[in-house]
């Protein structure tokens, strides 16, 4: 409303200025006609006045138009910045709500397991089962906290990448056995890792790529879990692929999912809690390892995350 009033007022001032310029020129013409009876001189001076009037009007209109366009562009940029700020605030609010839930859930589950152990005399097998559940929830809690702290360090440029030549084939296989043994045993995760593939990586932070991608694949596979993890070297490219048969990502959102705090907007994904940090962290780490990440549709359903590293940089 205010912006519209400013623009209309500006246009009105420009019209008044053009009218005033015309009135001044007309006044000068009348003075010339009164001051001499030489019609040739009057015609010459009046023609000069009209040319001057035309030039002044063009100058006023031209400068006014440029200023108006600059004003409109400035207002547009302010509006865009304001909209982005509102979206970011909403995303941060959603993040706080999500992370609160994500923190409370494993704490509550672990507390329940420990209370059960404390209050009941259970068989050794049942005790071990409850302990394993508690350890998994503790690992989940630890992973969430690591993601939040890591995202903060990356944003603040406090993380320094220390890269060394590593056997990423061994690194990924060891990681899968450590964190996803149950899923491997159930064939929920199928592995196709080419042996002896080396990359210059920071082995402290590189595993976050695998963990976040697989956790996402498991989280958004609502029915049958069928995740494949592959590592291949092909045409001077080292390609890491994590594919799933889950709910998939809409084409319009495939770029946005790497933005901080962003979560895909389908009802299914909204029902699944998350912080919107995982894929943001993945892309940041990939880019800082001179790689590129792509997300495409899997067939018949699901998503494929494909990361390309240049083998020549080893």
Image (cartoon, grey):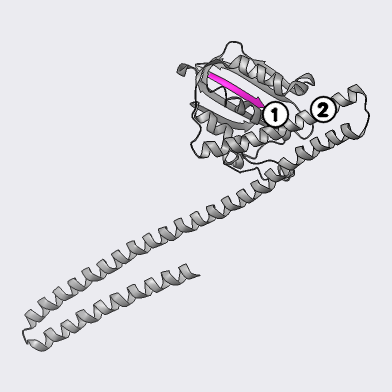
As drawn, the residue found furthest toward the bottom would be 34
Crowd class of label 2 (few under 14; some 14 to 19; many from 20; radius 10 Å):
some
Judging by the rendered image, the residue that carries numbered circle 1 is 244
- The residue lying at 50 percent from left, 35 percent from top is 158
- Which of these two is toward me, 294 or 161? 161
Judging by the rendered image, the residue that carries numbered circle 2 is 131
The x, y position of residue 115, in whole percent, is 86, 36
Crowd class of label 1 (few under 14; some 14 to 19; many from 20; radius 10 Å):
many
Vertical order, 251 against 237 (above or below): below
| Residue 207 magenta | no
> Residue 301: in sight, yes or no?
no
Which stretch appears magenta?
A: 238-246
Distance between the alpha carbons at the discs numbered 1 and 2: 29 Å
Write down the quadrant of residue 152 in the picture: top right
Tag 1–tag 2 contact (CB < 8 Å) = no
**188 horizontally vs 192: left or right:** right
Vertical order, 65 against 133 (above or below): below
The x, y position of residue 104, in whole percent, is 74, 42
Tell me which numbered mark, 1 or 2, is placed earlier along the sequence. Answer: 2
- The residue lying at 5 percent from left, 84 percent from top is 38
- Which of these two is toward me, 215 or 256? 215
- The residue lying at 59 percent from left, 27 percent from top is 306
The x, y position of residue 189, in whole percent, is 73, 22
Q: Which element type, helix, strand or loop, lies under badge 2? A: helix
Write down the quadrant of residue 69 in the picture: bottom left
Q: Main secondary structure of the magenta part?
A: strand
Q: Which element type, helix, strand or loop, lies under badge 1? A: loop
């Amino acid at each position: 409303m205010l912006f519209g009033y400013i623009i209309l007022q500006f246009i009105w001032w420009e019209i008044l200025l053009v009218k005033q310029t015309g009135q001044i020129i007309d006044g000068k013409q009348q003075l010339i006609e009164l001051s001499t009876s030489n019609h040739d001189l009057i015609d010459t001076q009046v023609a000069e006045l009209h040319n001057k009037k035309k030039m002044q009007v063009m100058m006023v209109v031209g400068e006014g138009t440029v200023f108006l366009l600059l004003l409109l562009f400035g207002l547009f940029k302010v509006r865009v910045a304001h909209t982005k700020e509102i979206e970011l605030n909403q995303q941060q609010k959603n993040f706080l709500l999500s992370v609160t839930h994500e923190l409370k859930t494993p704490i509550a589950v672990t507390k329940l397991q420990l209370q059960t152990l404390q209050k009941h005399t259970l068989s050794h097998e049942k005790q071990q089962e409850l302990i394993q559940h508690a350890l998994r929830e503790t690992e989940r809690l630890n992973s969430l906290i690591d993601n939040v702290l890591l995202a903060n360090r990356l944003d603040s440029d406090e993380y320094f990448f220390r890269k060394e030549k590593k056997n990423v084939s061994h690194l990924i296989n060891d990681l899968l056995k450590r964190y996803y043994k149950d899923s491997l045993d159930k064939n929920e995760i199928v592995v196709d890792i080419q042996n002896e593939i080396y990359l210059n990586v920071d082995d402290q932070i590189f595993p976050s790529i695998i963990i976040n991608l697989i956790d996402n694949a498991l989280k958004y596979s609502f029915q049958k879990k069928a995740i494949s993890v592959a590592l291949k070297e092909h045409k001077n490219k080292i390609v890491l692929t994590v594919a799933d048969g889950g709910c998939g990502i809409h084409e319009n959102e495939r770029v946005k999912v790497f933005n901080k705090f962003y979560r895909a907007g389908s009802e299914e994904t909204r029902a699944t809690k998350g912080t919107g940090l995982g894929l943001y962290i993945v892309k940041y780490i990939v880019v800082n390892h001179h790689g590129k990440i792509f997300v495409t549709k899997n067939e018949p359903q699901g998503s494929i995350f494909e990361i390309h590293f240049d083998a020549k940089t080893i």
